[in-house]
Amino acid sequence: MLWSSGLASVLGRFTQGKGIVFTLHRVLPPSERAFQPNSLLEITPQFLEETILQVRRAGLEFVSLSEATKRLKAGADYKGPRFVALTFDDGYRDNLDVAYPILKRHEVPFTVFITSGFCDRTSELWWVALERLIERQSKLVLLDGQPVLSLDCADICAKNAAFHRARAFLMHEVDEARQRRIIRETAHHYGLDLKALAAELVLSWEELRAWNRESLVSFGAHTVSHPALERLDPAAIHAEVAQGVQRMTDELGSKPTAFAYPYGFEQAADHRAFEVLRSFEFDACVTTRAGTLTKSYSDKCFRLPRVSLNGHHQNAQMVSLFLTGVPFVLYDGLAWLKKRLRS
């Protein structure tokens, strides 16, 4: 309705900001698999290319995250065109194999945020592990020394319900240490090799070093083990960030100047995490809280918003809406109103 009524284009003059940072994870050809609970994290190569062309037709310029941050900090002194920065989280192999040829063809700069433990094969892509476990079983029992959650996985409906129940349990009902302990023990019990899974899906340090020689790509930090920082104390947050930065510096030869909060939504990155990250003096720290780069963020580069290009919204109309910034302002306004009404 926002787009068809023309309201978005009118309001967009006030909400579009200077630019926008897009969040992506994986770029893969369409799959016919019936069970794809992580499809939110995937877009197709066709949609990526169409979005690049659409953004340019709209008159926006693709820039690196570093350049986007410089323009944002310049405030009223920046008089140039609106801009878009592309970012990819986690360092998936398809970023290089599938996305990069498209980005290179169109000369689009981009940033890949690296979770060092994934590259070291010491940390777990637990959401993918959970998908693989449920896909292969008709019944799955999560283990932590003893059974902690039994899941019916008999058919597709049951598998989808099982994934969402287990994901909620692991994200919200146990702490980070226990979350990983459960995944490791359960994977071992059912014969899923977590190191092999990381090697299958995530680029190695050797591959990243080779890619780092290309001018369009830059690498940012994304912690060691991809925890929800809100669930850690400040010392643990600092250690996750510092150790991830050090591993990247050791392996890639330079210190990353940008950081992405794992998960990045409000319940995963809170004010304590923001304060810790400010002490690292990154040029930019990005969340996944949706919004455009308005002037209000010119002095808040430690918590910049990003907009998700994901598998649930692969159409040009949604991209056009995102570029106006209107949906995010309306959402924030409704959230503020609900909070006021409750109080």
Image: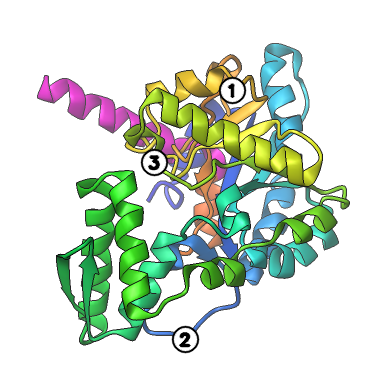
In the rendered structure, which disc, 3 or 2, sits on the residue that comes first in sequence? 2
- Per the image, the residue denoted by label 1 is 301
Image quadrant of residue 68?
top right
Q: Rate crowding at label 2 as few (under 14), some (14 to 19) or many (20 or more) other CA atoms within 10 Å.
A: few
Badge 1 element: loop
Identify the secondary structure beneath mark 3. Answer: loop
The disc, 1 or 3, on the residue closer to the chain's N-terminal end is 3
State the separation of the CA atoms marked 2 and 1: 40 Å
Which amino acid does the dot numbered 2 rest on?
Glu
- Work out whether residue 270 can be spotted: yes
Q: Name the spot of residue 194 as percent of width and height, x first.
A: 47, 68
Q: Residue at x 39, y 22 (%)?
A: 272
In percent of the image, x 43 and y 67: which residue is there?
128
Total count of labels = 3
Residue stretch in magenta: 323-343
Whether the residues at callouts 3 and 2 have beta carbons within 8 Å, the answer is: no
206 sits left or right of 163 in the view:
right
The answer to whether residue 199 is above or below residue 68 is below
Q: Residues under labels 3 and 2: Cα distance? A: 31 Å
Is 139 magenta? The answer is no
Q: Callout 1, which amino acid?
A: Cys
**Residue at which label 3 appears:** 228
- Give the number of the mark in front: 3 or 2: 3
The image quarter containing residue 28 is bottom right
Please state which amino acid type lies under the numbered disc 3.
Ala
* Image depth: mark 1 or mark 3 in front: 3
Q: Nearer the viewer, residue 83 or 16?
A: 83
Which residue in the protein does label 2 denote? 32
